[in-house]
Amino acid sequence: MGEKDIISKQIFKRILVDVATYLFELELDSAELLETEQQRIEDRRADLCARVVDKHQNVFILHLEIQNQNHATMPERMLRYLTDLRLQYPGEEIVQYLLYIGRGPLKMLNGIVTAQLSYRYRVIDMHQKNYRDFLSRNTPDAVVMAILCDFDGDEKRDVVHEVLRSLIKMTQGNHQQLREYIAMLEILATNRNLNLDIQQEYEMLHVEIEKLPSFVMGLEKGIEQGIEKGMEEGMEKGAKKQAYRVASKLLAKGMAVEDIIEITGLSMTEIKTINPDKSL
């Protein structure tokens, strides 16, 4: 995860918790990301560590590695991570998972067993997970996880677009929340080696959505509800900006000013400031 330094810790925490919830079936109450810069971890694609509390109030360190290639020495590397964590956080229980998202079949072992050592960790093979199972869940956190699953022969761009459509629908005009999920997708897509610009795909898809006849009607209803909700939550400023953006779009589509006033709650004077050169 080369983007780690410029991606917020909150997003990394959400990725870890979501993976634990939807892939490892761990029910966590909380998670605190741990610093691992001093560990002797080399050439890693992912390194997510957090001190977590499950629903039974058990406290342990959850370590997740996302691997997109088979490496014969992966068990040794995982053991090295374990010893580094044990030295850095002595006395704490450590649970390790390896999440394999490579293109080829999983060939890596899940531990080391010799006359001197018996060591195991849990491995999740994403070839065994179909992305449609995650898209069908009614939560954006699960939908994000679909990007890591097997595409079952479907085109990767089509899958990404389907994920983005679901996120747009589920976030219901909450742009900040949507940006967070897109950031998560960008991180996971990088580890998946999809070679797609998620932000660019979103922008292309958004343009296509705006061309649909149903977009304006849905936009009217969504913004009307969004403004009402924003007012109730004391977010008048944000709702006003949203109203201006919507009014601008509806003006461009030729909607009557009276209807725009009714939908957005803006006054005639406010709407005139959007396009002062146009006669309204």
Image (tube, grey):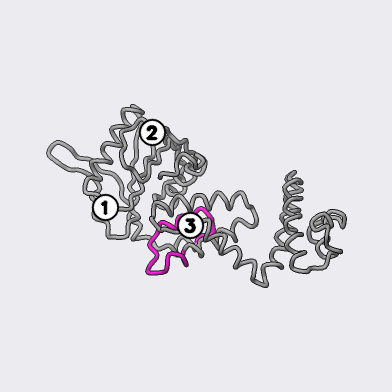
Dot 3 falls on a residue whose secondary structure is loop
Q: Residue at x 40, y 63 (%)?
A: 130
Q: Nearer the viewer, residue 262 or 120?
A: 262
How much space separates mark 2 and mark 3, taking CA atoms? 29 Å
Question: Label 1 belongs to which residue?
Answer: 70
Taking the magenta stretch, the answer to whether it contains residue 174 is no
* Residue 118 placement: quadrant: top left
Say which of 266 and 93 sits in front. Answer: 266
> Which stretch did the figure color magenta?
137-159
Lateral position of residue 236 relative to residue 279, left or right: left
Q: Verify CB contact (< 8 Å) between mark 2 and mark 3.
A: no
Residue 255 on image: x %, y %: 79, 68
Residue at the spot of label 2: 36
Q: Quadrant of residue 225?
A: bottom right
Which residue in the rendered view is the most extreme toward the bottom?
Answer: 213
Per the model, the C-alpha gap separating discs 2 and 1 is 23 Å
The kind of residue on which mark 2 rests is Thr
Q: Is residue 156 magenta?
A: yes
Q: Is residue 136 left or right of residue 73?
A: right
Q: Quadrant of the C terminus?
A: bottom right
User: What is the C-alpha distance between the residues marked 3 and 1?
Assistant: 25 Å
Residue 224 percent across, percent down from the top left:
75, 58
Give the residue at mark 3.
Answer: 197
Task: Report the amino acid beneath label 1.
Answer: Asn
Q: Which quadrant: the N terminus?
A: top left
- Residue type beneath disc 3: Asp
Where does the image place residue 127, in percent across and percent down from the top left? 34, 60
Density class for disc 1 (Cα within 10 Å; few <14, some 14-19, many ≥20) is some
